[in-house]
Amino acid sequence: MNHKHFITHILIAFAIGSCSVLLPTAAPPQATQAKTTQAAAPTSAASQGSWNAVIGLVSPGVATIGKTSMTSSSKFEVQWNLPNQTVDHFEIIASDGKSKVTMNAKGTEKTATLTALKSATKYAVTMKACLDVKCEKFLASDKTAEGKTSEEVWQVQGKGTTYQTATKLVDDGNTKAYPIVYGDWAGKDLAGKIQLYYDPINSNEKGAKIGTMIVSKIDALASIMPLKSLSGFGLISYCRPQPGGQPKPPQPGTPGQPSQPQPPQKTTCEGTSSAARVATFQAIPLGDKLGAKVRFFFEGEGTDGKTRVMYIDSKDGYVGRDFNSGSSTVCSTAADYSKGGGCEPTVILGIEGDATYGNKNIKAVRQFKIGYPTMNDWRWDGASGSFMFITIDVPTTCSKYMMTSGYAVWDGKEWKVQYDANGCPKLFQAVQAPMPMHIGGTRYKMYFNNNAMQPGGAPGGGVPSATSLDEKPMKVIYADASLTGDPNVVDYEDWETIEQAHEITYMWSDGSVLGMKDESHLDDYAIFTPNNNLDFQVMYSNMSLSDIKPGTNFEPPFIGVVLLMNP
């Protein structure tokens, strides 16, 4: 975020247990500093001239804390005059100079709300008064109205101004939370519920565990947190530090020297498997044609020390808890994950040198997320056009950054990494923890940590340093599949560049703004709408308590909750 910005909002407290959580509420609309400019003279043969529309833009006021107010990051309320002719309907077009958002209003209406706009973006709004159903004849608005949406403002749920008093999503949560939201398609016992997949803190359960809702349905803010853990299911990494615990974090070196990595505890890796360790993951319900089950995509580290993307399908349909075809309901042994085992994975994205699904100039495939139209249906139908952001290791001739994301598109049969003419994958540079979110139609946004870590020096160094861990602010970019190529496929070129990324503001419960270091300690997040409404956007995120300074006790991350306050 731009920490010079002073953001405004309203504090509404709802008691949940001993914690207060915040929920956005409507506030009186506030006018943007909109201006009008003369629109270009209509040239279409269908145009019947223009009318004095007097378009006005109002940015809805969303919330207030103290003396400061906050307006919407994605909406304009549009007002206009009616022409002196009968109008079938109006077309309202908002353009940011690259992409457009269009909506219709009835011919008798004088107001409408534009939604799903980009945050912190200048828009020019024009209108057509369509004189027939197909808009073959229309009047054009005589002037263009201009306005700018606000920066997104997210709020950490809990108390105080530290992660130590933030609300925990699940008691034993450590990292990598990813939810699925069940619709009516899942049956009456699951419909209207969230199921969480997460990496727990307990060393003998590291991998992926299940979390479930405490209440019966998604009906209020309280229903999305906290959640309860469910033992007896999941995927456990059989190759992990022994005895319990995690590898120690890197410790800073002397001034001017890179921090020194601490050796992990001795690991035990038996057998031959591509999934000795279960790392980042994403559970996706599949449509009826794909078997009506949950597909657990994950980053697996093999006994060869290489990481690839693979999946295992649930054996209990949409319940999505049992992924072992054997008698156990847990995947946990070398035999389970090996060829012929009850949890044998299917690799879908490999590295250079792999005989199957190998990819040139990719040394490792790590953290990833798949984008598909969840606003339409949380079930993936396998149709071509879905995409995947993948954190990859590439040669220094392809990227100078240690954190960089490649891009793959599903062609209906397999994931195809997109490449430049020079043989390097098309890259989103300095991107860590990419998280796409569907916002309607063929439009998406993608959140990420902007981590400029480089080998050998700050920010960064050959190993993570205090500088790199504390200087990776979160940002967001947008995509529109209609911009290039197939309008149903979100290609690499349909995305904004990293240089065009939009700033984000994060705040504590009292409305004070997180500094760079605290913002940088949000990681491995999942961002979604629990009720298929963009007015309710939720982030489940790692939250790190450690400053990583000499003499500071390392406290492992936990999973917390952050809410978008000005959708």
Image (tube, rainbow, N blue to C red):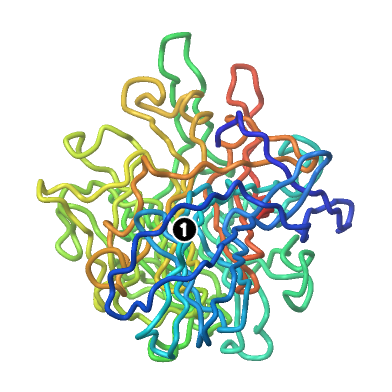
Quarter occupied by the N terminus: top right
Exactly how many numbered labels are in the figure? 1
The foreground one among 279 and 206 is 279
Residue 228 quadrant:
bottom right
Q: Is residue 82 left or right of residue 122?
A: right
Against 487, residue 478 (above or below) is above
Q: Position of residue 536 (x, y in %)?
A: 66, 64
- The residue located at (60%, 68%) in the rendering is 113
- The residue located at (74%, 61%) in the rendering is 225
Residue 69 in view, yes or no: yes
- The residue located at (33%, 48%) in the rendering is 405
Against 209, residue 366 (above or below) is above
The foreground one among 41 and 380 is 41
- Residue under circle 1? 144
Q: Is residue 347 left or right of residue 146?
A: left
Q: Position of residue 442 (x, y in %)?
A: 39, 71
Mark 1 belongs to which amino acid? Thr
- The residue located at (56%, 43%) in the rendering is 504
The foreground one among 322 and 557 is 557
Residue 340 quadrant:
bottom left
Q: Residue furthest top?
A: 255
Quarter occupied by the C terminus: bottom right
Residue 238 in view, yes or no: no
Q: Position of residue 515 (x, y in %)?
A: 63, 30
Residue 58 quadrant:
bottom right
Q: Residue furthest left?
A: 422
| Mark 1 surroundings: few (<14), some (14-19) or many (≥20) residues within 10 A | many
Q: Judging from the image, what secondary structure is the residue with disc 1 in?
A: strand
The foreground one among 242 and 37 is 37
Q: Position of residue 226 (x, y in %)?
A: 75, 60
Against 364, residue 186 (above or below) is below
